[in-house]
Structures are given as structure tokens and as C-alpha cells.
Amino acid sequence: MTESVHEPLLSVQNLWVTFPSLKKEVAAVRNVSFTMGREKIGIVGESGSGKSVTGRAVLRLLPSYARIEADQIAYQGADLQGCTEKQMRRIRGKGISMVMQDPKYSLNPVHTVGRQIREAYAIHHRVSSREAKNQTLNMLAAVRIRNPEQVYRLYPHEVSGGMGQRIMIAMMLIPKPGLMIADEPTSALDVTVQLQVLAILDDLVSERGMGLIFISHDLELVSSFCDRIIIMYGGRIMEIIAADELHNSRHPYTRGLLNCLPRIDGERGLLPVLMRDEAWLDEEYLSISG
Amino acid sequence: MLRVDNLNVVFGHGEDSNQAVQDVSFQVDRGHSFGLVGESGSGKSTVLNCISGLLTNWDGTIVVDGIPLTHKRTISFYRQVQMVFQDPYGSLHPRHTVDATLKEPIAIHKLGNANQRVERVLSEVGLGPQFRFRYPHQLSGGQRQRVAVARALILEPEIVLLDEPTSALDVSIQAEVLNLLWEIRRERGLTYVLVSHDLAIVSHMCDTISVMKQGKTVEIINREQLRNGDITEDYTRQLLIAGRGYDRAAIDNFQDF
């Protein structure tokens, strides 16, 4: 752990996120721990499983009333919990960046595409505006936008969903982050466009040797895209499993999720229904299943 | 039971006009389940909206049970054909209880026995009597979609139009709603037209499947052909490959259609 080569890119230990409310506190994330290197790791879960909150807690992008507690949230060995807001702003973008779900709501509607991407670069690099523009055009080309000069001048409402998502990826990659958190980056897209966007992300991540946290509800997609999968339910990690081992998983929740999907080559009739077990959320059960 | 011939829909005028549906034809036999599958903008929901009477600017022929439909529908049509919408968060009135939502169609059609009908349909969709006087915000997504299904069933229709009935739901809830739809069709001998972007759902639920793209029918295949990969169109094949998950090598061969 002392040498930087062996240091994990991101280490999260015993993360709890609680939202206070009038009646009782809601623990959205409970006792989540994982470490990752320069790999693609998927966080999968149903709605309310805490997968997005986990991603946002790392970057401290939750509303101020949320209480984040952890033994450790360390990026390249540096603890993020002790960082001031000013230090966090340097980490967001250049260290860890985040791609949001829907380009319709996440891009600034009153600025051109080019200006937004250029800003993401210029904040972290002291360069001339001409250089920033060149970098932006190169980045747009890297996410396979065919006519960067033209797209540079467009406003977000003038681009399609698939292109909007590629613009977001360009914006998040241009500061050259070490780790990217992608929160359902493609679930608003058609299936073929979704895969094309993922291919771009995949190529750029392996080219630059970045780490990627891919948050999704689509277990099959994540298992074919990522190296390892974290499966979450009710704010807890059910299991962490290598993607190619997923179909051998013995955890009842993982099995249930896999079985309830309709398949083209599957049997007709009734689908197996996921039976939830309260015991999954107990400390003891988790320590037994490891 | 249902026949659609040369359906055309144009939105807008002049230069801005957009042909959302172009020469779409298909027919569905009584008691069968027909799937419309395609990516966004393929016109699949527009076809459904024409059949249900929500859109009136269509040309072509729509025949239900031997009777050609006009743009203006009679009240008896709506007893025969009902629709379930995509978003259970948007399709239920937030200030009506489940009971009020379900009683409205009974009042419109002057059916009587409202209380018994509501009780019966609620138990049929797997919701206990305790849900009857709840508001939509007191229900989960899956429970809301069950209410939407109940609202369609309470008029005892023969054709149910399903517009992406599970795309807003988690996969475990999706399985429950698909099972519910499957059982109801078997018990009541209903005819379904199901719209979805997911080939797996359509092949699970439907006997015959129409693949649509940019308002046109690409091909109409049956379930066995889809399972065996007996497909003539490259577009369908690409959809099928894409549905199998991430495969870096296959993606480079994707074409723009």
C-alpha cells in the first residue's frame, strides 16, 4: 500500500449515507466498501438500491442535508473526506468526473456545446482560448462526432440524444480524469446507439488507462461491459463478483434478478418472480455470505 | 379481430411535415398477441394511438371485429378496445383514489354494480381490498401499473392496447406485470397489441412481431423465426445482436439504417 503503483485508484470503506426526514432517518447507503484499480467496475441495482447515491457521495455531490459517513473515501491514496470545497472542485473533473443520465437536463441549454466543453478544459488547464478550442474540437472528434466544427456551434436542443450523450462524455473526458463515474449514461438511448456510445467510452478508458464506475440497472449489459460487478439492494452490497462469473453466482438476489428477465430463446409462460428476503439486509447474513 | 391497412400519419404541414407512419398494414386474429417493436421515432406508439382513437389525423383502414373505424368513435368502441399507457406515474389522476379512477369508466358506460366490479377487478390484478381507497402516491410503480391494467379491464374489453407497459419499472416488477398480463389474456381470451423497444419482451409475450423503423414496417415475423434467427432484414438482425449485450467487435459492424 505504500507504493503508488499498488495503491488502489479509489478506496471506499464503510460508507453510510443518511437523509434526515421528519419521522425517521433514511439510510440510503449502508456499510458500502470496495476498492478499485484502473478497471471497469459496474454498480447494479434496482431503483432505491443506493447505487447513484454511492457514486455521488464519492464526489460529494449530494445535497447539504445528506449525512455522509465513512471510514475512508480515498482517491489515489488521498482522503477526500478532509478536503475543503475548494480542493474538491479541483478533484471534480480533473481527478474524478461524472457523466449524468440525461443530456437533456444535464447540459446548459443557453450555452453552445463548444463553450461548455471548452470551459471544462480551461478550468483545469491554463491555456490560450485558441488552444482550448483546438482541444475541444479534438475531443469532439474523439467521441466520433463527424463534423466537430459544426457541432461546436450548436446549442444542446439542436442535437439528438445520442449526440448529447457523446457531448457529455467529451466534456467529462477533456480534463483527463483518472476515474470516471458514469451514472446510467446510456439508459435514455436506443439500444444500438447505447452500444455505440459505450464502445466510445470503452475505447477511451482503455486508451488512457482510466478507471470507470458504471452505474446501471441493466445487469446483462453491465456483465458484458465491465470487469467486476457490485450488486446492491436496499443500500447494501449484496455481492461483488467478476463479470464472467455472474452466471455462476449463488446469491439469491443476483439469481432472482437474472431469472426474471424475459429472453428471446427462453420459455414462454410465467416468468420466475423475485422473492425478496428481509434477511439479505441483516448484518449477520452478509457476514456469512461474505 | 383487428386489421390495419395502409395506415398513414403525417404530423405538421408543408416543409416541416413529418410522415410518422407510412403504409403500415397488419392483422391480429382473435385471442392472439401482436407485437410492435422499434427504436424511438419508429412510429410504433403512433400506430397504437390511431387504433385507440387518441389520434384522428390518420388515413387508411382500421377494422375492428369486421367494422371499419371512422375518426369519430362511438361509446361502444371504447368498451371493446382499451389501452394501458407507458408511465404509471403520469397516467393516473393524482387526486383520484384507486376507487374513483376505476369507477369513472363504469359511470361513463352506465354499467351499474360499481362496487362489485371494482372489488372483482382489483382482486384480478392482484391488489387486495386495502388498496381501494389509496391515492396513486401511496402506491409503488408496479402497484400503479396494476391499477392502470385494472382500469382497462373493468370495461371487459376484447382488445387491449399496451404501450410499453413495463419500461418504467424495475426488472423484478416488470416480471410481475408481464405475468399478470399473460394470465389475464389466457383467462379472458383477450387480443393484445403490445408496443415495446425490447425484443425480448415482445418475443416473450407475442405470437407475431412487426419490426418498425422510421414509420415503416421492416418485416413481420413470428416468434419461432425470431428465436431461430430466421430473419431476412439486416435491421432486425442488428437489433437482435444489440439486445444480447455489449460486444466490442459487433459494434463496429453496426450500420446506420
Image: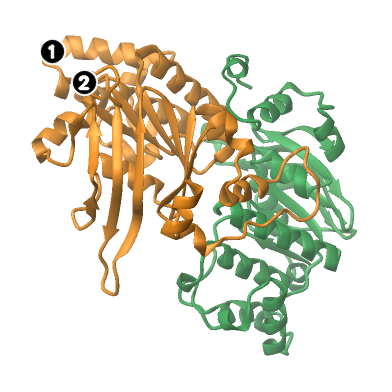
Chain colours: A orange, B green
State if disc 2 and disc 1 touch (CB < 8 Å): yes
Location of residue B157 in the rendering, given as x and y in whole percent from the top left corner: 78, 69
- The image quarter containing residue B18 is top right
Q: Amino acid at mark 2?
A: Tyr
Q: Nearer the viewer, residue A154 or B95?
A: B95
Q: Tell which residue pokes out farthest to the front in this image.
A: A288
Q: Nearer the viewer, residue A279 or B5?
A: A279
Q: Which mark is residue A127?
A: 1
Location of residue B178 in the rendering, given as x and y in whole percent from the top left corner: 70, 56
Q: Nearer the viewer, residue A242 or A131?
A: A242
Left or right: where does residue A227 sit relative to residue B233?
Answer: left
Write the residue at 90% across / 58% down: B66
Q: Amino acid at mark 1?
A: Val
Write the residue at 35% across / 47% down: A32
Q: Is residue B157 above or below residue A186?
A: below
Q: Residues within 10 Å of mark 1 (few under 14, many from 20)?
A: few
- The image quarter containing residue B158 is bottom right
Q: Is residue B142 visible?
A: yes
Q: Which residue is mark 2?
A: A121
Write the residue at 59% across / 32% down: A245
Give the CA distance from mark 1 to mark 2.
9 Å
Q: Nearer the viewer, residue A196 or B23?
A: A196
Q: Is residue A190 visible?
A: no
Left or right: where does residue B56 sit relative to residue A120?
Answer: right
Q: The N terminus of chain A appears in which quarter of the rendering?
A: top left
The chain containing the residue under callout 2 comes to: A
Callout 2: SS: helix
- The image quarter containing residue B40 is top right
Write the residue at 35% across / 14% down: A208
Q: Is residue B139 above or below residue A80?
A: below
Callout 1: SS: loop
Location of residue B95 in the rendering, given as x and y in whole percent from the top left corner: 46, 76
